[in-house]
Image (cartoon, grey):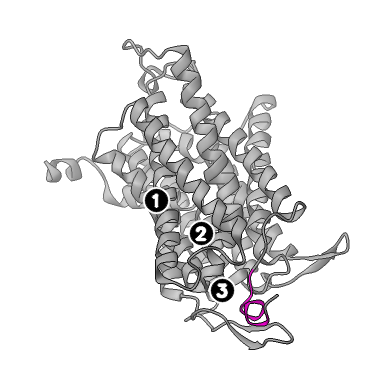
Amino acid sequence: MLSQKLSNRKLIVDLLALMFGLGAWVGVNGIYVQLPLLVNSAPEGWSLPAHMVVLVQFANLGPILYTLYIKYNAWAYDKYITYILLAAASIATFIMAFVYNKTSIIFGNEHSTALLSLMFVTAIVGCTSSVLFMPYMRNYREIYLVSYLVGEGLSGFVPSVVALIQGVGGNPTCVNATTSESYYPEPRFSSQAFFIFVGSLLFLCYLSFLGLNNLSVAVGERVKLPGSMETLPTDTRAPPSYKTNSGWTMSTQVYSYLLIMMALVCFLGNGTLPSIQSYSCLPYGNVVYHLTVTLSAMAGPLAMSLGFVIKIPKVSCLSALTAVLIVLSGFVCFLAAASPTPPLQNTWIGELLVVLSWILINGLIGFIKLGITTLFRPDPGRGLYYTGVATQVGSLIGAIATFVLVNHARVFHSYSPCSAISGH
């Protein structure tokens, strides 16, 4: 069976599609897994993740502009737009490697303007990929869409593995308690080297997309010539191969309930929790934060890959998993609010609980989102479109609300080994 499947496809095209998918979010995910190192020197400190989360949400300007572009233009060359986006992400990441620590004064406060502005460029690529990259893969045989999705999942996994190898050097120590000077050990290699690696990956993704469009072996795997305008699979005008009329039914109540569940999961997973992750982890040490960020980034793609081997659970099971997610989210929010002196601080039990909680949270978020999306997939109408709307609405509300709590309400407080010694 395996040899039969492999003989019916071109592995080089699988690799090109995988690398194309990798380019969607590898830039943003690469910056996120560097947070344990970046928060130590950034002027925003522990609130840097909250700034990043809000920026990613504002990067949804990309798909909005793309949607307006294809609506009001008689011609739209998706291929060339994709070239521009991948090239911009690669160049932005290479530049970031040399200027990520450059700051400037805005409205009287120092900010990591170079890091945040260049991250915004990579975030636009990620946000636009959902309406541009994946629909473009319909130009090729359906079997290569799976390869693209695997690559998109690896966009979080690969940077996390490299970040694990990089390490954080260990927990900070207090050099001088009176002046609050903390010493942070050096990692195995710098953030500059890491960003150069991610920029190189993005350049390979650009070359892979170039290969998909120009190599004869890839052109031969197309199912149709690439047109100027692609019909989205959620559109009711989509070709019959992308929709089904085989009696798909879902009550209005369940339909609305699943959309609300998706909005809630994204409110937590894309908006609230990433913004307060530093406050819930760093009081337990830099190593705990590093392990949490890298391992939890792996948990999401791994949980979503379960959809290839197990049956997607029913609505009742997804509801139970969402309840577990809410409990775990409440726990890590409690830890963040208790910073800089959360319970079980300086104990291995506390450190283990923090890391495991975040791994479970990200795994549940990935699996629940996969389950809801799968339930809507057979919808011959616009179910997947509304799923995307719920995703963006929930994420935006969570990001803005938490940004206000972190930066203006001052609900969360940072920790320093020196403050612990001096008692303030």
Evaluate if marks 1 and 2 touch, with contact meaning CB atoms under 8 Å apart. no
Magenta span main SS: helix
Mark in the foreground, 1 or 2: 1
Circle 3 residues within 10 Å: few <14, some 14–19, many ≥20? many
Q: Could you tell me residue 280's position as x and y percent?
A: 55, 60
Q: Quick one: SS at disc 2?
A: helix
Instruction: Report the quarter where the C terminus lies.
Output: bottom right
Q: Could you tell me residue 102's position as x and y percent?
A: 73, 72
Q: Could you tell me residue 103's position as x and y percent?
A: 76, 70
Mark in the foreground, 3 or 1: 1
Q: Is residue 113 above or below residue 371?
A: below
Three-letter code for the amino acid on which mark 1 is drawn = Leu
Q: Is residue 330 above or below residue 421?
A: above
Left or right: 423 in relation to 7: right
Q: Quick one: SS at disc 1?
A: helix
- Magenta residues, as a range? 415-422
Three-letter code for the amino acid on which mark 2 is drawn = Leu
Marks 3 and 2, the one that precedes in the sequence: 3
| Disc assigned to residue 191 | 3
Residue at which label 2 appears: 202
Q: Could you tell me residue 55's position as x and y percent?
A: 67, 50
